[in-house]
Image (cartoon, rainbow, N blue to C red):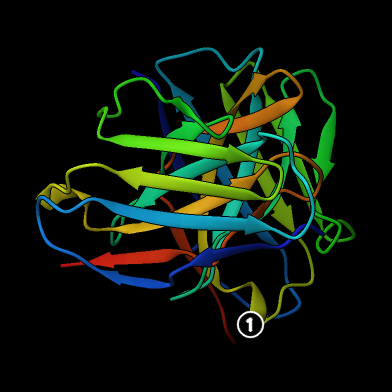
Amino acid sequence: DIQLTQSPSFLSASVGDRVTITCRASQGISSYLAWYQQKPGKAPKLLIYAASTLQSGVPSRFSGSGSGTEFTLTISILQPEDFATYYCQQVNSYPYTFGQGTKLEI
Amino acid sequence: QVQLQESGPGLVKPSETLSLTCTVSGGPISSYYWSWIRQPPGKGLEWIGYMYYSGSTNYNPSLQSRVTISVDTSRNQFSLRLTSVTAADTAVYYCARGIAIGTARYFDYWGRGTLVTVSS
């Protein structure tokens, strides 16, 4: 199975900050990576797919980049509603796997 | 707007079978990959598997011997069966719709999730 390691696991930031979360894959996955946002008690929400394509309706302050084994999710100007847990997921090969999550806290 | 809603027992006894149904509204069940994903309390996400509406399946090998996903196109529903459950199967179970982008499947709509506890 492909392992995804996110860093950091916890991130403290303030409204207006720029933050970056990294996801590293244990082997190359081309651009087959998605990012999800999950708030407490809610289902995950697809933010980005194919490493850098913004899902419809997602604010443009979210962006993704990378290919191969290293990927990043960047939030350019943090808003209060962005404090949540973020997961990366690889869809290059089965079984699909997720990173352990990054909790973004105020 | 597409909506997914999980339903089924919230409590299952050890060694018994967990059965959940996901009802899809606001969109067709055809041409998509219907998936189950779970999240143990306080932990991360685990992909269980999916079924394409026409019948092909792909399961997580860690669960493959115990899991069955089926689709009922006439009812716009799909289901999960997980046999011989143990406490390790206690989790919030999410149903999700998979869209094909090339050879990849991304999950763009999710249900709100249902907690299933395995306990006697």
Q: Nearer the viewer, residue B2 or A100?
A: A100
Q: Where in the figure is residue A83, as x and y percent of width and height?
A: 22, 57
Mark 1 surroundings: few (<14), some (14-19) or many (≥20) residues within 10 A = some
Residue that lies at the very extreme toward the bottom in this rendered image? B120
Residue that lies at the very extreme toward the right in this rendered image? B65
Instruction: Provide the chain ID for the residue under circle 1.
Output: B
Q: Residue at x 75, y 60 (%)?
A: A26
Secondary structure at numbered mark 1: helix
Q: Where in the figure is residue B3, as x and y percent of width and height?
A: 39, 28
Above/below status of A72 relative to A47: below
Q: Nearer the viewer, residue B72 or A73?
A: A73
Above/below status of A78 relative to B105: below
Quarter placement of the C terminus of chain A: bottom left
Q: Residue at x 25, y 29 (%)?
A: A59
Task: Count every numbered label the image shows and give the total.
Answer: 1
Q: Nearer the viewer, residue B77 or A48?
A: A48
Answer left or right for A74 relative to A17: right
Res B98 → quadrant: top right
Q: Can the viewer see residue A31?
A: yes
Q: Can the viewer see residue A44?
A: no
Q: Nearer the viewer, residue B71 or A25?
A: A25
Residue type of the residue flagged with mark 1: Ala
Q: Residue at x 21, y 50 (%)?
A: A82
Q: Where in the figure is residue B8, as x and y percent of width and height?
A: 51, 53
Q: Residue at x 54, y 67 (%)?
A: A100
Answer left or right for A10 relative to A36: left
Res A21 → quadrant: bottom left
Q: Where in the figure is residue B109, as x and y percent of width and height?
A: 45, 32
Res A99 → quadrant: bottom right
Residue at numbered disc 1: B87
Above/below status of B88 relative to A12: below
